[in-house]
Image (cartoon, grey):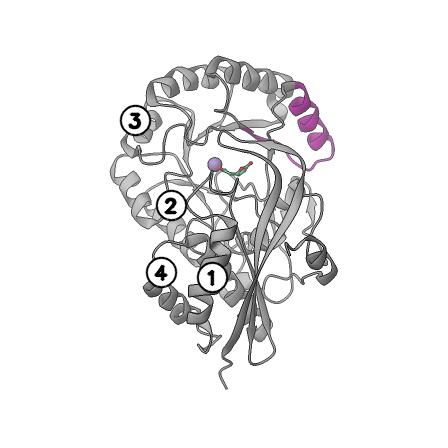
Amino acid sequence: MTALIESVETLLVDLPTIRPHKLSMATMATQTLVIVRLKCADGIEGIGEATTIGGLAYGPESPESMKVNIDTYLAPALVGLAADNVNLAMARLDKLAKGNVIAKSALETALLDAQGKRLGVPLATLLGGARHDHLPVLWTLASGDTDKDIEEARKRLEQRRHRDFKLKIGANEVDHDVRHVAAIKAALGDRASVRVDVNQAWDEATAVRAIAALEEAGVDLIEQPIPAHERAGLARLANRFEVTMLADEGVQDLRCGLALIESGFSGAFALKIAKSAGPRGALRLAHLADAGGIGLYGGTMLEGSIGTAASLHAWATLPEMAWGTEMFGPLLLTDDIVTTPLRYDDFGVALPQGPGLGLELDHDKLREYARS
Ligand SMILES: O=C(O)C[C@H]1C=CC(=O)O1
Ligand SMILES: [Mn+2]
């Protein structure tokens, strides 16, 4: 007999970061996770996570708005629906609410987690099956201090935890940023791949000047150098330089992806379950990228373990991604709200095994960090 969805609970969970995380649009000292608990009539609970960066600095959904929108609109529309039909449940949400992609991603994750637990199979199996059980993971250097970043990178290399590093730039004057990146690349040499994420901070003329210098310094990947809506500009930069351009904020959904491909963009797409309203949408974008000759990268919104595991289950179903993943979110946080944290080793992370996400909530930790 089909189990119905009985209730959906949301919690705001504030977890401190291990150090300030400086991006072009915000400096983070805490990450706020919106945790979703979806309970079904057969006693099964699915969990999901909706997480963004810097309140409203990164995009139109904030943790607080996601909680209100789920509680007021999305959760009531799910209650009473068949818990085992993710297609119908998500179609209902899409009809009811425009946008709200991060909130929808948390709900889709919770539905998939519940269904995996119900059938006794990992979430990746519901998505067609895992091709990998270990995925490469880079680390973001974003302390804001060149020497500290070099020290951090050397430590991660020695620990065999990461060998690819992404530097967050764009908050400072361009020449300062270029010197910062070049010094880090010079200190690490061929032992590491160094990439940058500008988070839309430059105009095209500035990007041309800066990318030429970054290419010279040995940077491997330039992420979202100019504003998201400037698709033709990103295509021009991709064609002008040898170093690969990575579209992140500029590729939100399938239509953006198609528009970028049609404008002649060659490079890579950052997939994020949060941008695509869930793991299934992120995989649809991956398939579009494949058709357009675009490379793939497994992106994060700096989620905790739940959002990170949901992403890993999706990325594990794809052929090897050209640019690996950045699924390090849990490592940036001082604590966790699941009983068995993800296992990071050998320059990557293990895909959690077990039904659904393969994670259990730690109820004491949840109480400790949940906003009252
Ligand atoms: O890529 C982004 O824009 C957001 C995020 C991912 C890694 C990180 O440090 O920030
Ligand atoms: Mn980015």
Give the Cα separation between the discs numbered 2 and 1.
21 Å
Q: Looking at the image, do the residues carrying marks 2 and 1 touch, with CB atoms under 8 Å apart? A: no
Looking at the rendered image, the disc whose residue lies closer to the viewer, 2 or 3, is: 2
Disc 2 CB within 8 Å of nearest ligand 2 atom: no
Task: Give the percent coordinates (x, y) of residue 131.
Answer: 54, 55
Name the element at disc 2: loop
Mark seen at residue 52: none
Snapshot quadrant of residue 138: top right
Question: Circle 1 sits on which residue?
Answer: 70
Instruction: Answer left or right for 216 relative to 194.
Output: left
Residue drawn at point x = 70 percent, y = 36 percent: 160
Instruction: Answer left or right for 12 relative to 230.
Output: right
Question: Circle 4 sits on which residue?
Answer: 97
- The answer, for residue 366, to whether it is visible in the render is yes
Label 3: few (<14), some or many (≥20) within 10 Å? some
Q: Is residue 288 magenta?
A: no
Question: Circle 3 sits on which residue?
Answer: 236
Q: Nearer the viewer, residue 286 or 150?
A: 150
Q: Looking at the image, do the residues carrying marks 4 and 2 touch, with CB atoms under 8 Å apart? A: no
- Tell me the magenta residue range: 147-167
Check disc 4 and give the amino acid type: Ala
Give the Cα separation between the discs numbered 1 and 4.
10 Å
Looking at the rendered image, the disc whose residue lies closer to the viewer, 4 or 2, is: 4
Q: Specify the farthest residue to the front.
A: 372
Label 4: few (<14), some or many (≥20) within 10 Å? few
Q: Earlier in the sequence, mark 4 or mark 3?
A: 4
Name the element at disc 3: helix
Q: Is residue 236 above or below residue 341?
A: above
Question: Circle 2 sits on which residue?
Answer: 252
Give the Cα separation between the discs numbered 2 and 3.
19 Å
